[in-house]
Image (cartoon, helix red, strand yellow):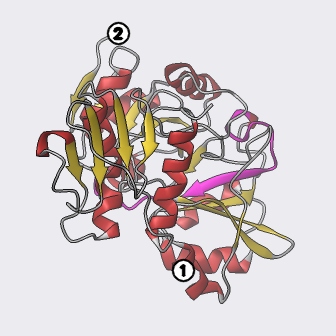
Amino acid sequence: METIVGTDCEQARLLLEKGEVVAIPTETVYGLAANGLNESAVLKIFEAKGRPLNNPLILHFISKEAIQPFIIDFPPVLDKLATHFWPGPLTLLLEKSNLVPELITSGLDRVGVRVPSQTLVQELLQSLSFPLAAPSANLYGMISPTQATHVNNQLKGKIPYILDGGPCEDGIESTIIGLENEQVIVYRLGGISLEQISIVIGYIPQLKNHIENQPLTSGMVKHHYAPNTPFAYLESDFVFEEDKKDGFILLKDNRPEIPITQKYILSKTGDFKEAAQKLYAAMHHMDQKCFTRLYIEKFEEIGLGISMNDRLNRATKKFEE
């Protein structure tokens, strides 16, 4: 299969209406999209990614109003969060209606829904009569893509079209939230921090982002977001050795002893928003450099640092066992 990279929303629309899969840009990461109401099309997402069928997908809509037919209820506190953060990097887990195929939710009662803010995907959604099911547009368990080239490197020959919207603005997946016993629960850390959520709801929500068997939603599995190169945290007492071909991803350039050819600086000023936007791009870039090992600094556990550490914990875990 030939994979075309372009900026033509009309071509993307025609392919999606024919039941094909298309990689799409969002403000978080690139998604691998299909008609969320067409199970044959949705199966192509799982096949292209190598994603297990027990891992639910998120549905993307043009507006909050467009979601209503696909859910049973919109609890007031979640409605409040939607009003505050949509369009944007927030996914809500809501009780699904019969319009949502079982394949989307892996047979579970709740469906993840969100309204993305990226201009090109909004244009595409506006032209469609159905929501888009869209997990990240990468091979299962690998680094999420934040540029069209990242998608092409992993899925070339597996999908017909990549809609190129440029680099993703946020660069980290959406925060996934639901309700249990009338309390807000965070199932996946993401582009909206716990602190931001607490300002809206009046308390710090409980974090429940690990599972044993059946994931409740995307991003809950133990090993995820990983490069091919062995990947580990950079400890504070680490001593750089010139004769080792290691690569380093640093928040700021605080390791002058490491040659510039062996390091990637996420933000000269140490800004977490800039670091989150560049994190996956840095991992993709360094993974292609044929280093023996990659090291990354752990972020301070505040704001987006918590979300980024969540991704890195899952990425490094693959190489600890």
Q: Residue at x 50, y 57 (%)?
A: 309
How many residues crowd around disc 1 within 10 Å: few (fewer than 14), some, or many (20 or more)? some
Q: Which residue range is magenta in the image?
A: 103-120
> Please, what secondary structure does the residue beneath circle 1 have?
helix
Residue 137 in the image, given as x and y percentages of width and height? 43, 35
Q: Residue at x 24, y 39 (%)?
A: 164
Is 111 part of what is drawn in magenta? yes
Who is closer to the viewer here, 120 or 258? 258
Question: Tag on residue 20?
Answer: none
Q: Quadrant of residue 14?
A: top left
Q: Quadrant of residue 320?
A: top right
| Mark 1 lies on residue | 195
| Mark 2 lies on residue | 1
Is 90 part of what is drawn in magenta? no
- Asked if residue 117 lies left or right of residue 216, the reply is left
Asked whether residue 62 is in view, the answer is no
Residue 166 in the image, given as x and y percentages of width and height? 22, 47
Q: Amino acid at mark 1?
A: Glu
- Asked if residue 203 lies left or right of residue 240, the reply is right
Q: Quadrant of residue 275?
A: bottom left
Q: How many marks?
A: 2
> Please, what secondary structure does the residue beneath circle 2 have?
loop
Residue 308 in the image, given as x and y percentages of width and height? 46, 58
Q: Is residue 125 above or below residue 54?
A: below
Who is closer to the viewer here, 299 or 212? 299
Q: Residue at x 47, y 73 (%)?
A: 303
Mark 1 or mark 2: name the one nearer the start of the chain.
2
Asked whether residue 125 is in view, the answer is yes
Residue at far top of view: 1
